[in-house]
């Protein structure tokens, strides 16, 4: 049985972020199929909108999540030193500060 040797470049595996060939092929087939359904999808959305605007908004929001990046929440931990006047800072950012 062969041992791993330091510096051996053979067999290092798939590079980070590289897609599996089968996953890429399946995604390509799905995209081609979806592209052929554009007219049907538009017609279906129009019918749902006509029948139920509320259901249309729900459906559209679910559909859009695949095309619009989701917002993420970030926690910022820190400490403010001194006083902070939110209104003054907002006016300054808007260019309304009265110097």
Image (cartoon, rainbow, N blue to C red):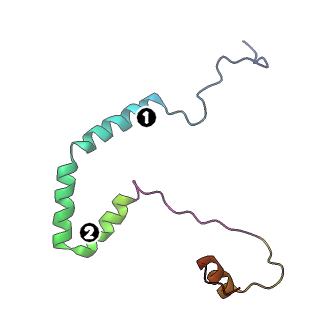
Which of the 4 image quadrants contains residue 75? Answer: bottom right
Quadrant of res 25: top left
Residue 58 percent location from the top left of the image: 32, 69
In the picture provided, is 81 more to the left or to the right than 69? right
Residue 92, position as x, y percentages in the image: 65, 80
| Residue furthest right in the image | 81
Q: Position of residue 79 (x, y in %)?
A: 80, 75
Residue corresponding to mark 1: 23
Which is nearer the eye, 61 or 13? 61
19 relative to 95 in the view: left or right: left
Q: Does 69 appear in magenta? A: yes
Q: Secondary structure at mark 2?
A: helix
Above or below — where is 6 with respect to 14?
A: above
Identify the mark nearer the N-term, 1 or 2: 1
Type of secondary structure dominating the magenta stretch: loop
Q: Position of residue 56 (x, y in %)?
A: 26, 69
Residue 83: which disc?
Answer: none
Relative to 63, does residue 97 appear above or below in the rendering?
A: below
Residue 6 is left or right of residue 43, and the answer is: right
Closer-to-camera residue (92/31): 92
Helix, strand or loop status at disc 1 = helix
- Viewer-proximal residue, 60 or 98? 98
The residue that mark 2 highlights is 56
Query: Which range of residues does the magenta coloring cover?
Result: 65-77
The quadrant the C terminus occupies is bottom right
Alpha-carbon span between mark 1 and mark 2 = 31 Å
Quadrant showing the N terminus:
top right
Q: Is residue 11 above or below residue 41?
A: above
Residue at 41% over, 59% down: 65
Q: Residue at x 49, y 60 (%)?
A: 70
């Amino acid at each position: 049985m062969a041992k791993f040797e330091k510096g051996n470049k053979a067999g290092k595996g798939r590079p980070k972020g590289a897609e599996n060939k089968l996953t890429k092929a399946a995604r390509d087939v799905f995209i081609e199929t979806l592209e052929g359904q554009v007219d049907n999808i538009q017609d279906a959305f129009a019918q749902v909108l006509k029948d139920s605007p509320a259901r249309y908004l729900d459906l559209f929001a679910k559909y859009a999540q695949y095309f619009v990046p989701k917002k993420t929440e970030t926690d910022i931990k820190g400490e403010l030193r001194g006083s902070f006047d939110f209104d003054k800072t907002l006016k300054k950012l808007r260019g309304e500060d009265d110097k």
